[in-house]
Amino acid sequence: MVFKVKIKKNLLAGTKINKYSFLMVLLYIMPFVDSVSGAFHDELPIGQIYRLVLFFYMLTLLMTVSKRTFINVLFPFMVFLLIQSIVSSNYIKDSLQGVIKLFTPIILVSLIQTLQKEKKYKLDIFNLMDFWSIAYPVLILVPGLMGIGISAYEGEIGWKGFFYAVNEISFILSSLVAYMFWRLNFKSNMYSLFVLAFNCLCVALMGTKMGYATVFVFLILFIFAFMRNENQKQSLKILILICFLVFVIIYYKDQIIQSTSLIFERWRYLRKHSYSTTDFLFSMRLRRLNKAITLFTKEMHYLFGWGFGGSDFGYPNMEMDFLDLLFQTGIFGLFYILYFYGKQLVSVFHKNLWGVAIIIWSLALSFGAGHVLFYGQSGMMLAANIILAYEIKSQTQNRK
């Protein structure tokens, strides 16, 4: 209940709306916008309009806060736009959209860091993640209980509410699961346990390998942190909560097995028709690699790639973000993105196990499963994960 009250108070604090708190409003409504956008996907580009508004609002806000940071972000953005317009003249619209999506998380991270550095505004990332951790499961589970929504895969396999892009919403849920594991470890209570369980349930129902892997990885990290915890009282609370969760899982095991049986049948079918375990784990994406390398080298796309919209004109889409960045933006584009996110990782690295794990896992999912770095929904969650990692570091230092 403590967290619910906190969320309510922070939302009501927005009664005095200013240019900074309006940014928070835009971030809070993201789950609802994307759910509605998924429901009307073939009729109205609601999500695209929302992100264009957010993109240009963030740019404008950054310009008013720090002209130096604004130029540091705007210059590479304009260079990317110029290069993409040259290399992809036949599909320039898709390529320009790709650049905007690529820079949306970069601008969001830069803006929040600058606002906090200049002491203009401090984003309460914990409150935002708490809110999203409730909103996303509700928007997935409630339509399911009502018998409406969209299946994650053909044949009514998996469930994702009204959200459209299964890989993007899976990355968001994976990020929320990682966050809630940290929350349970940092401040163990029944609320954190239940919200974690609801997010894990959504992951189980959606049925992506990305989601299942995230639950496993952060469960291991949680156990490791639990074993290192010197606070005996907190350790006892966590142990009691875990025992309670295990009891609930055992009690509802038949319903859980029934709900996920089609997902595992689909996995068995795909594994049977895969060349190898690696082929299965990467969802057959690596089969496109030979063609991509051949076109990349034969047509001399080394420096600037063939553009974000190339998949519509016969160029392979790897759906593995860092490979797609190399092929679509060349060595130039890949180097810049590696530099930006590498710098963020280095900045949070010192004595920050959970924060480092969240960023590394986010980038690992981006590489292995794709649909993160230059995609609308998941790109914003990536930015939130980076901001979260910084705040986890601050929380850890303040706790000592």
Image: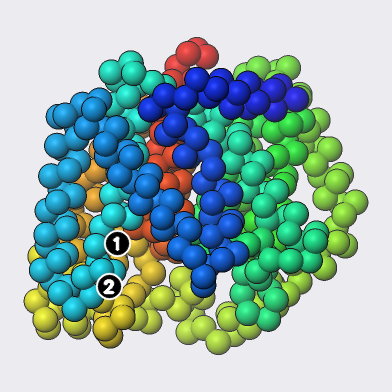
Residue positioned 59% across, 41% down in the render: 132
Asked if one can make out residue 144 in the rendered structure from this viewpoint, the answer is yes
First in sequence: mark 1 vs mark 2: 1
Figure quadrant of the N terminus: top right
SS of the residue under disc 2 = loop
Q: Position of residue 151 (x, y in %)?
A: 66, 71
Amino acid type, mark 2: Gly
Other-residue count near label 1 (Cα within 10 Å), few / some / many at <14 / 14–19 / ≥20: some
Residue toward you, 59 or 16: 16
Residue positioned 24% across, 43% down in the render: 340
Give above or below for 196 relative to 141.
Answer: above
Instruction: Give the side of residue 376 with respect to residue 303, left or right.
Output: right
Give above or below for 398 relative to 207.
Answer: above
SS of the residue under disc 1 = helix
Mark 1 and mark 2: Cα distance apart in space: 9 Å
Residue 113: which numbered mark, if any? none
- Quadrant in which residue 254 is drawn: bottom right
Q: Which residue is mark 2?
A: 309
Residue positioned 45% across, 17% down in the render: 397
- Quadrant in which residue 256 is drawn: bottom right
Asked if one can make out residue 225 in the rendered structure from this viewpoint, the answer is no
Q: Which residue is mark 1?
A: 97
Residue positioned 62% across, 69% down in the render: 152
Q: Position of residue 126 (x, y in %)?
A: 54, 29
Amino acid type, mark 1: Gln
